[in-house]
Image (cartoon, rainbow, N blue to C red):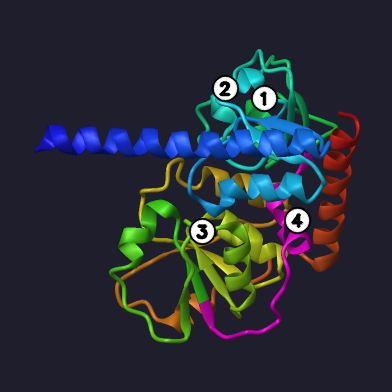
């Protein structure tokens, strides 16, 4: 029985990869036919809105993102904790990515680091100046529409590794469960329908910041790889204090909401968005 389960899991992975490769090839051909610029990137090609955001990000600049299976063929490392898969001989651009844990050392590299998630990741690759600290996810509010309608007191976005835990919890009808394994546009719409957001997904918090929805990092478990590293990296890069609360049995909705806040001003966000927009626009324009 165990052997059959392993076989089925492997078969599922191969089928999904085959399907995604078909889509990738189709998008490549379409970009060529329509004379759109192409950005080749190695990123986490998984069913998670934060990683899928990469496509919408590049599309918003009028170009087409094409996945490549290795960093050696990548032109840019975009959104996500992907830099651990990039080695020192990478010669392309870093435009917003970061490291998932602090053990990676990529100093003395050939990277062109223009945007990096935060100072912790910058230190890990030896960057000390001429770099913008930000995650391109802060552009979500410029890429997706804001519904403007608040239907829920609180939206909760678990990390994909916390979904099974969340499904066992009991919340009232004023709480919106926002599943992370959906398209970014759908997640963004749900976020704008909420008055507050609690999330164990970093991009859940970043999207909420972009839409100016008060939020808090709600830690459900120790399942998320890297612990607090990527969260601290992002918040330090935005000159904000990283905060989180641990979920406990019996925790009330009001307890969660009372910890939700906006950690930097709208003017600060706009300046960061302008900087990120300028750098990515220049990168694509000069291709």
Crowd class of label 2 (few under 14; some 14 to 19; many from 20; radius 10 Å)? few
Q: Residue furthest front?
A: 33
Question: Which residue is denoted by mark 3 in the rendering?
Answer: 182
Query: Quadrant of residue 96 in the image?
Result: top right
Q: Which of the two residues, 64 or 89, is positioned nearer the viewer here?
A: 64
Question: Which of marks 2 and 4 precedes in the sequence?
Answer: 2
Question: Which of marks 3 and 4 precedes in the sequence?
Answer: 4
Look at the numbered discs 2 and 3 and tell me whether their residues touch, using CB distance below 8 Å: no
* Residue 149 forms part of the magenta stretch: yes
Q: Which of the two residues, 232 or 73, is positioned nearer the viewer here?
A: 73
For the residues labelled 2 and 3, the Cα–Cα distance comes to 25 Å
Image location (x, y in percent) of residue 258:
54, 79
Question: Which residue is denoted by mark 4 in the rendering?
Answer: 139
For the residues labelled 3 and 1, the Cα–Cα distance comes to 25 Å
> How many discs appear?
4
Question: Which residue is denoted by mark 1 in the rendering?
Answer: 74
From the image, state whether disc 1 or disc 4 is nearer to you: 1
Question: Which residue is denoted by mark 2 in the rendering?
Answer: 70
For the residues labelled 2 and 1, the Cα–Cα distance comes to 7 Å
Q: Residue furthest left?
A: 1
Look at the numbered discs 2 and 1 and tell me whether their residues touch, using CB distance below 8 Å: yes
């Amino acid at each position: 029985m165990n052997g059959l389960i392993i076989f089925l899991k492997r078969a599922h992975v191969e089928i999904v990869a085959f399907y995604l490769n078909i889509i990738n090839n189709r998008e490549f051909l379409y970009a060529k036919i329509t004379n759109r610029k192409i950005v080749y990137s190695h990123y986490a090609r998984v069913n998670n809105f934060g990683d899928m955001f990469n496509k919408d990000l590049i599309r918003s600049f009028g170009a087409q993102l094409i996945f490549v299976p290795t960093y050696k063929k990548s032109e840019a490392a975009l959104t996500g904790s992907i830099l651990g898969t990039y080695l020192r001989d990478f010669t392309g651009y870093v435009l917003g990515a970061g490291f998932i844990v602090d053990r990676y050392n990529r100093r003395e590299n050939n990277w062109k680091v223009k945007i990096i998630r935060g100072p912790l990741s910058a230190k890990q690759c030896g960057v000390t100046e001429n770099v913008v600290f930000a995650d391109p996810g802060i552009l979500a509010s410029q890429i997706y529409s804001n519904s403007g309608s608040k239907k829920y007191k609180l939206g909760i976005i678990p990390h994909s590794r916390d979904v099974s835990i969340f499904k066992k919890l009991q919340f009232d009808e004023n709480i919106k469960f926002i599943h992370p394994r959906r398209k970014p546009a759908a997640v963004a719409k749900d976020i704008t329908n909420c008055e507050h957001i609690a999330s164990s997904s970093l991009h859940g918090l970043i999207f909420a910041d972009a839409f100016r929805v008060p939020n808090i990092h709600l830690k459900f478990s120790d399942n998320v790889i890297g612990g607090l590293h990527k969260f601290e990296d992002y918040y330090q890069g935005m000159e904000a204090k990283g905060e989180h609360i641990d979920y406990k049995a019996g925790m009330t909705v009001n307890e969660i909401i009372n910890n939700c806040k906006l950690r930097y001003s709208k003017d600060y966000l706009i300046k960061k968005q302008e900087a990120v927009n300028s750098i990515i626009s220049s990168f694509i324009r000069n291709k």
